[in-house]
Structures are given as structure tokens and as C-alpha cells.
Image (tube, helix red, strand yellow):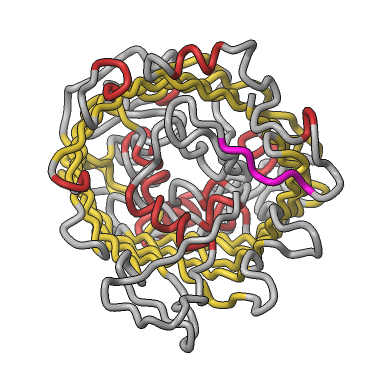
Amino acid sequence: MHRQLRICGSRCRRTPLRAEVPAALLLWLLAASGPAPGTPPPPGGAPTVTAPTTPGEEQTPPAPAGRRSGLLRQSYLLGDLGGLREKLSKYGISLYLAETSEVLGNVTGGVRRGAKYDGVTVADVQLDTQRAFAHHGGTFNASLLQIHGSNLSAENLYTLQTASGIEADRATRLWELWYQQKFLEEDRLDVKVGQQSLDQEFMVSLNGLVFVNTMFGWPMAPSADLPGGGPAYPLSALGVRVRTRPTDAITVLAGVFNGSPVSNNNGDPQRENANGLRFPLNGGALVIAEVQYLYPALGTMVYADRPAPKPGLYKLGAYYDTEDFADEEFGTDGLSLANPASSGVPRTHHGNYGLYGVVDQLVWLSPDDPDRTLSFFARAVGQPQSDRNLISLGVNVGFVLRDPLHLRDEDTFGVGLGYARVTDGASALDRDTNYFSGNSAPIRSSETFIEATYQYQYAPWCQIQPDIQYVFNPGGDIASPNASGQRIGDELVIGTRVNILF
């Protein structure tokens, strides 16, 4: 929902204030302060559909042009559920139920061509302790996932940067289960304890969430290099997260979580914890910290005779995992894993770290329509230890245009790019394999994709999103299983996603 936010310090001039910071600032402010109760961010790159910001408070965005009443105006497809939402809100309980369904297919490249359907239903229940028990600042949260359909990336594409942020093994599973408590004046400190998915708060570009590809959500480097892909959709891990806002411009996030979302790092992590009801605390720890800087901050003076500042949110972060990691090239005997004389058991390394930065910056505001904005975003995540990582660098950049067409102020258009660089250690193993086998298979190096997407807001509770992606060097330039010595062909992926808020 597009909203105007006016910010002004105590020393504003007496002239009438006319310059307004555009709606994008409000979104970045929400991102800096974390998700509001009842508004869980979507998994991966899933589109955003606005839920109530407080239990029982229905937001009713303006309906698209020409649709002014009835079903197409209400915030939810099922409305108030016969009065249930209103009754539960009196006890501080909010309900969130959303379905994301899509059909994507590759018309060129891949190991086979075709289309696949996949979807996820997200159910979230939150309890506001202020309303329930007159206890300020507390929130209980429980969320469930019902994942259905097939997996285009695993079955057709063989890409590193998977085509959809909701692709996962079929399952019905617990996702998050936590309690959050706010402290201090203006709620400048809060602590969250329990089962958490890091992609809901850390390393996030708000503009990147417009896109379908997974890597605009949880980044490539931790997805490939951390145990189980890290505690991110559809997995999570037990831990403690602390957030503080020492100034109106700066927010600091820090957390300690179990080093892996599963107790056994061998095999498919989603099958190791198929229903999400295991809460491992064995092994190591994953420590992560992030500093966010928001400009302009609340309290910034805005004058009628000066242009409104273009808001931006900047993030720097680091993480360290104390688990053990397998070597990409060498075994415990010092021989290449491709050497027939090798034991085949990789040597292990203790610990792994990554660094990242995220930028969300408004670059253009229409002088005639404050809802029409162009934003730039960029994110880089690096894990430089080549001997224990598959991916050394992942980069995402793009532009997002809101209100792209006349009378379509709820629509969004985006163009983005993703890049993943394979480590020297993994590439060296490919060369060793060619040497010992006498073959000339491709050597993995990097994978790049571009994506163009359009979110059409059919109703406040429904988005329809056509999407197109093109992948260069799928899998980092891996060999095709269909033709010896040849690489998988570049891939054109097209499809449509539908997101419904019930």
C-alpha cells in the first residue's frame, strides 16, 4: 500500500511543509525496524502481500482502477472469516494465510525442457501480549509451511541460482517458533528467542524481494556453503537475536544460532528434518551481526523550498560458522579427491566466514506522481576461503520501478541480475578430474542470470506476476549428462506467479 510519510525535526521553518518523502521511505523504515507483527516477510524471492500491521488492524489499500467495491476491494480474499479475525484480535491474536503458486518452464537449454508447477502455503499466527495479557512489547509467533508441486531447478535446469524462491521438497513443516520482547523507551531494544529463519531479517534487500529467483532472497554464498544451506527457507534454527536502535539512523542486529539447521549434515537437509519438529543444538554455532544505516532518519528536516531527500538503506554484515567443512579438492591423505589412489575422504577445516553489504537506494521520484519511484539495489556476499567453499562471491543488482503505468500505482516492474563465482578449489577439482580421467569436461567458473518481472496488483489480496529469466553457464558451466564433454546450454525460463492473501 502506497503511503505518504512526512518527516520534520523540531526546528522546521515556519513556511508550509510541502516536500514529502515518498512511500519507499516507509518501506525502508519498516525494513530497518524489522517485520511488523502479523507481517512475516515472504520466503525467498516470493512477492509481498501486505498483512495487518497489528492484530485486528485491517489495511485496505486502494483498489486497482475500475474496481471500487466488494470482493476486489477487501484486504483478504476471505474477508474477516465470518467475524473470526475481529474476535481473535480482541485477544491479541492475528492470522496470516497466503498461497504462492507458479508455473515456470525452460524453453531453451537445461538437461530437459518443460514446465513445472510449484507452490507454498504460509500460515502464521501471532499473539500480542499487550492485548492478551496487558504486557507491553511481547510477541509470540508460530508459522507453518505446506510446500507442494515440483522443482524445476533440480529436475530441468541444474542451476546454482535456483529459478524460484519457493522451490523446496514437498512437505508440511514447522517453519518458525519464537518469542520477541521489546525493551527501553521507543522500543529501541528487542530480543527474539526460538526457532528462526535468518532470511527474514538478515542480508535482505527490500527491493530484491520483488523478484522470483531465489537469490534475490537468501543469497547464493551461504546457500551453497553453509551446512544445510543455512537457517533459511524452508529451514530454521534455534537461536537468540538482539536488535538495538541507538540512533534514529542506525540499527544493529546480532544473533547466535545453531551452526546447522539439521543435526546430520550428510544428505538432503530438508529430509533430515522433514517436518521441522527437530530442534538440534549439537555441533557448532553460527554467529552473525549486521549494521544498518538509514538516510534520512526520522527527525530529518524537510523544507518546502528544498527537494525532498532520496532515502536509502545501507547494510554491512559478517557471519562465522564454527562447524567443520569439507575440502573442495584434497582428501585426508593429501591427494586430490579426483586421484584414483585417494582415500576419497575430504580433509576437514574448522570454521567458515562471510562478509556482505546491501544497498537499497531511491534514485528517482516523479515530480508529478509521488507514488512513481525508481529504486536501485545491490548486494554482494563473499566467502573467501576457497578450500572449503563452492561459491566465493555472489552479487545481485537491479532496478525496481513502482507505479510503472498510468493508473497502476500498485504495480511494480523490476529488472535484476545475479552472479555467482565458483571457488578456485572447486575449479581445481574439475581440472584434476579431467587429468586423471583423460577427459575434457567443462571447468566450473561462474553463473549469471538476468530477470525481468512485473507484479500486477489485481486486488489488495492478489498479485499476478509474469516473469522471464535467462541463465548463462548453468551450474557454473557444468557438463551436460546428455552429451559427454558438452556443457549445459544457456536457459530461457518463463512463467507466471500468483500470490493470494486469504
Residue 483 lies in magenta, yes or no? no
- Choose between 66 and 428: the one closer to the eye: 66
Question: Which residue shows up at 21% across the image and 29% down it?
Answer: 136
- Choose between 435 and 276: the one closer to the eye: 276
Q: Is residue 336 visible?
A: no
- Choose between 194 and 166: the one closer to the eye: 194
Residue 328: x %, y % from top left = 33, 49
- Choose between 400 and 273: the one closer to the eye: 400
Question: Which residue shows up at 53% across the image and 60% down it?
Answer: 4
Quadrant position of residue 350: top left
Q: Is residue 30 left or right of residue 370?
A: left
Question: Which residue shows up at 68% across the image and 57% down it?
Answer: 412
Residue 417: x %, y % from top left = 59, 64
Q: Is residue 205 left or right of residue 375?
A: left
Quadrant position of residue 469: bottom right
Compared with 434, 293 (above or below) is below
Residue 63 lies in magenta, yes or no? yes
Residue range corresponding to the magenta coloring = 59-64
Magenta stretch prevailing secondary structure: loop
Residue 177: x %, y % from top left = 33, 21
